Image (cartoon, rainbow, N blue to C red):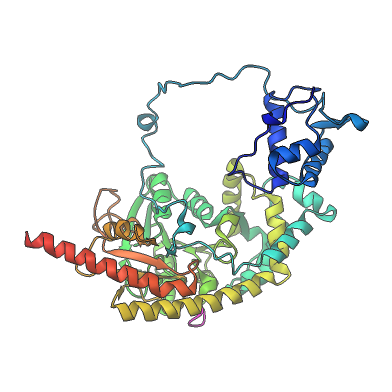
Amino acid sequence: MAIPVEAFRLTETGAGTLQQRIRQMVAEGIVSGRFPLGEKLPSTRGLAQHLGVARITVTLAYTELLSDDYLVSRGRSGYFVSQSAPSGPAFPIEMGPKREAVDFATLTGRRFSAPARISRPEDWRDYPFAFIYGQTDPTLFDHQNWRACALRALGRKDFEALTRDYYERDDPLLIQYILRTILPRRGIEARPEEVLLTMGAQNALWLAAEVLLGPGRVCALENPSYPGLHAILAQTGAQMHFVDVDEEGLPPDAVPAGVNVVFTTPSHQCPTNATLPLGRRHDLLARAEREDMVIVEDDYEFEMSFLRPVSPSLKSLDRNGRVVHLGSFSKSLFPGLRLGYIVGPAAFIDEARALRATVLRHPPGHIQRTAAYFLSLGHHDALINRMKAAYRRRRTIMDEAIRAEGLMIAGKGEFGGSSFWMRMPDGGDSEKLALRLREQGVLIEPGRVFFGPSGSGSSDSGSSRVGCEFYRLAYSSIPANRIAEGIALIARGLRAHEGQKAGSAGL
C-alpha cells in the first residue's frame, strides 16, 4: 500500500516554486519519520490530482528527490522512500511548554539590545509611501548581470575560490579591483596589505573601534550621527564626546582636546547630508597631526554625489597615515550584500585582520567572487549611473513637493545623497508624528535616535528628548510617482499634529 495522498498537503504561504514546495514537503515528511523508509509514494498522477498541479511538476520534484537519494525508483512499481534517505534524530524531541529559569535580561545587563536603534516595520515595502533610508529599489538593480556573475562564480574555473578557506586573507580578484578602480576615484593609492574586506560598513566600524579604542581611551563623534556607531563605541568602554555638527558638517575646532580617535562622515554627513568642505578637511588633518589623533573616515554615500563634483577623501589628503578609511557596497549594490572594506596603514590592517579572524575569518568566498566579476565587468558603474539619474529626478520631485507644502528642510545636502533631513516647527515630536502617519501608509524616520545625550561631551546614555523635532525622508526606494502624494500626507499630518498641540496648550 502506498502512502495515502491525504498525507500530503501544500501550505498556501510556502516559499519557492510549486516544484520546490513539493520537494520540500516530501523531504520533510521523510526526515521527520512520517514517511517511513521503504514506503511507497503516491503515483505522480495521483499526487498531482490531489494537489491540483500539473503531473510534470510532481515528476520533476520526484526526479530531484531521486538524485539526492530521498527516493528510489523500482521499474514499473513506482517511487519508494530510499532505505538510505536522510533521517531525523534517533531520540524523541520533547514538546510542550518550558520554564525559563534564568533571567537573561539581568544576567546580560542588556548591553547590546538596550541602545536605541532605527526601527521600521518588517513589512515596510507594503506601505505605499515608505520614505525609508538605506533600502534599494529593485527596479533599478541589474538582476540579470548579477545572476550571470553569480553563476560564473559557481563555475568549475572558480570552484577553488568558492570553496577554499582563505583563513585571514580575501579574494585577490576583488582586492585588486578595489585598488585599481574604487579607491583611485576617491584619490586613494593603497597596496594589497592595506585593504581588508568586511561584512559591510557596520562591521568595519566595529573592527576599527575595537582595534583603536578601549577603557581609558577617548573618542569623538558627530552629533547627530549613525545610531549603530553610538552602540559600537559604548561597548569599547572608551569615553565618548558628541560634537554638534553645523551646515558644513563636523567643525574641527569643536573637537575637544585629549581625543584619541575622531569618527566622521565627510562625504555625506549622517543624517544631515552635509559635505565637509575642503578647508575643514585640511584643518581636521592638521589638528590630528598636532594632537596625535587618528581619524576614522566613514565614506558614507560617496557614490551618490550627483549635484556637485565629489570632494577628495580625507584618506587621499592624509600624508602621515592618520586616516582609516571605511567603504561599503551596501548603498551602491544592495544592503543585504553585507560587503565593505577598510583601508589603513598595514600595521593597523594586520591587527584588524587578526580580530576579524577571531569572529568570521572572511566574508563568504562566493559573495566576494560574484562582486568582483560584477564590478570588473563594468556592471557596477552602469548601475551607479542609473541610480544617480533616478535619485536626481526623485530628489527634484521631493524638493519641489516639500517647498510647495511648506515643510522645513534642516540639512543642507548640496552634493546629493538619498534623503532629506527635516525639522518640525516649534519643537514638535516626530515620533508621535510617525505613529500618526503610519496609519495612513506613510513611513518616516524620527530623528531622536541619531542624537547623543543632551550636552555635548557626555557619555551618559540618559533618556533625553533631544532631537525629537527632526526626522529623515529618504527617496532611494519610493517610486517617483508617489513622492508628491506622500509629502502632502506628511504636511497634512503635521498640520493635524500642530492643531492638537495648540488645543492641548489652550487647555
User: From the viewer's perspective, is residue 108 above or below residue 227?
Assistant: above
Q: Does residue 199 appear left or right of residue 234 in this picture?
A: right
- Quarter of image, res 78: top right
Image mark count? 0
Split into 4 quadrants, where in the image is the N terminus?
Answer: top right
Q: Does residue 127 appear left or right of residue 32 in this picture?
A: left
Q: Say which residue appears at 73% left-offset and 27% top-offset.
A: 4
Q: Is residue 309 magenta?
A: yes
Split into 4 quadrants, where in the image is the C terminus?
Answer: bottom left
User: From the viewer's perspective, is residue 307 above or below residue 40?
Assistant: below
In depth, the one of 33 and 366 nearer the eye is: 33
Q: Magenta-highlighted stretch: main secondary structure?
A: loop
User: From the viewer's perspective, is residue 95 above or below residue 247?
Assistant: above
- Quarter of image, res 11: top right
Q: Which residue lies most toward the top here?
A: 91
User: From the viewer's perspective, is residue 356 above or below residue 103?
Assistant: below
Q: Is residue 344 visible?
A: no
Residue 61 x/y as whole percent: 77, 41
Residue 89 x/y as whole percent: 67, 22
Q: Does residue 121 appear left or right of residue 345 in this picture?
A: left
In depth, the one of 275 and 188 nearer the eye is: 275
In depth, the one of 52 and 431 nearer the eye is: 52
Q: Which residue lies most toward the left here?
A: 507
Residue 347 x/y as whole percent: 58, 55
Q: Is residue 141 magenta?
A: no
Q: Say which residue appears at 39% left-offset and 79% top-offset.
A: 399
Residue 401 x/y as whole percent: 37, 78
Residue numbers of the magenta segment:
305-310
Q: Is residue 466 visible?
A: yes
